Amino acid sequence: MSTEPKGEGSREPTLTRAGIIAVGSELLTPFRTDTNSLFITGKLNDLGIEVTLKAIVGDDLQAIVSTFEHVRAHADLMVLTGGLGPTADDLTREAVALALGLSLDEDTEVVERIRRRFARRGLEMPEVNRRQALVPRGAIALENANGTAPGLWIEPAGGPVLLLPGPPREMQPMLDRVVETHLARYAGPSRLYRRVMRIAGRTESHVEEAVQPVYSRWAAASPPIATTILASPGQIELHLTVHAAAREEAESLLDRATSEIATVLGPDLFSADERLLEEVVGGLLRQRRFRIALAESCTGGLVASRLTDVPGSSDYVDASLVTYSNAAKTRFLGVPESLIRANGAVSAPVALGMATGVRERTGADVGVGITGIAGPGGGTPEKPVGLVVIAVAGPGDAISVRTFTFPGERRLVKFQASQAALDAVRRVLLDSAEPVLR
Ligand code: ATP
């Protein structure tokens, strides 16, 4: 714990380093992912508390105790999630009490709370639920609005310990509340502020190469801005973070760094305000009052699905046809059979025929054609799996046709194709009028 003095009226030392332990044997199988620790990390980061260590441990008393002791050596705040249920394999309470040398006593108020919860559903409280009312000496039981397991807040020497239930719908609102009621007191004056920049059309190393001179300058500034590059299929993210005492100071620093990076990346940067590509494309279509129609083959409707994930998309999505077979491309889009025979279904002329066909038949301003080989079968040396051709026709006379070869398995190829199609539309729209302010 840092000994940094805090503001007037506050006695607690500032917490800077947290450790998280997710408890549950199911989290050690391939069937359940520990997502709670990500949510907890986000909330702690917002308070300026960094997570220095996290662990996942099964439902084993000794393992939880020794993991607790190990993580505690690296952290001044401990957060545990899971294992607060009523059954014999829910051991987090016992383990923490054991590790801290605290006795466990039944809290009659908690028993009553659980009893009332059952009574509201016309049920009697099973005796096993009494386990959930065991509270380490000196701990505060935290009410659970969505379940029976109360959380626990303990303040032993060495820094606070927070126990949260496992189910995310119980854990999340409880943590939100505990931040207000208990944790905020321990947070220092500085908070962590983040800016997410999203980029399409460049590889991770190309992004790194372009922005490195900018971010190394900001990394040396005071306060420093830290930059992380995260690559995912079809998209690179740059996360800029800065610790600052005041929001205005942080936002103004992040604004300046973002605008320098935006200059370097040009139109490859598509979002600096958390918006996803489908939202950005939707925004451009709405702003320019264009309607879009899609002819999708290998993406199976994914582009339309993503566009219509955005509320209000009926303002600009006109139609989407999944024309998977060659016959459907001819029947619904008017792509000549001879064109398909001469070039193959995955080819620039067919993609363009799909885009112009769907545009003409719907009267939309922008038509998109997507054709490709998602795999795993169907590839040839000339046309390998992952080959995708994307055409955009309109607005006006604009025509864009691009061929890609995407790596990865079927779903990944489909996703990357949808990303490239949305990005192709975005670029055509950016060229179609004055670029909008990001
Ligand atoms: P209860 O037994 O009252 O439901 P609990 O605190 O004992 O609460 P667990 O039994 O450990 O919680 O977990 C219940 C369910 O919550 C798990 O099956 C899992 O679906 C989910 N869960 C538990 N821990 C996590 C985690 N770290 N991340 C995401 N989900 C989790």
Image (cartoon, rainbow, N blue to C red):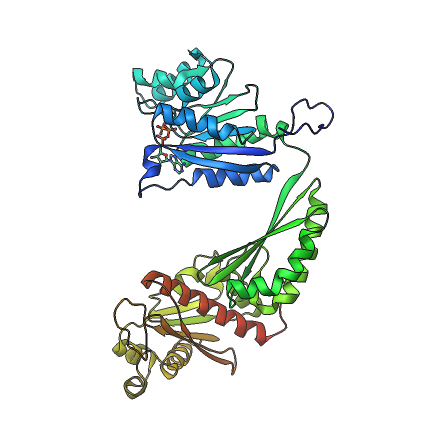
Q: Nearer the viewer, residue 229 or 428?
A: 229
Q: How many marks?
A: 0
Residue at x 33% of width, y 82% of height: 334
Residue 93 in the image, given as x and y percentages of width and height: 41, 21
Q: Is residue 112 above or below residue 411?
A: above
Q: Is residue 218 left or right of residue 330?
A: right
Give ligand 1's quarter of the image: top left
Residue 151 in the image, given as x and y percentages of width and height: 46, 24
Q: Is residue 138 left or right of residue 125?
A: right
Q: Nearer the viewer, residue 375 or 212?
A: 212
Q: Nearer the viewer, residue 92 or 101?
A: 101
Which quadrant of the view contains residue 353? Answer: bottom left
Q: Is residue 309 left or right of residue 251?
A: left
Residue at x 50% of width, y 36% of height: 53
Q: Is residue 73 above or below residue 412?
A: above
Residue 123 in the image, given as x and y percentages of width and height: 30, 20
Which quadrant of the view contains residue 309? Answer: bottom left
Residue at x 62% of width, y 70% of height: 435
Q: Nearer the viewer, residue 293 or 344?
A: 344
Q: Is residue 385 above or below residue 93?
A: below
The quadrant the C terminus occupies is bottom right
The quadrant the N terminus occupies is top right
Q: Is residue 282 visible?
A: no
Q: Is residue 222 left or right of residue 19?
A: right
Q: Is residue 152 visible?
A: yes
Residue 12 in the image, given as x and y percentages of width and height: 65, 23
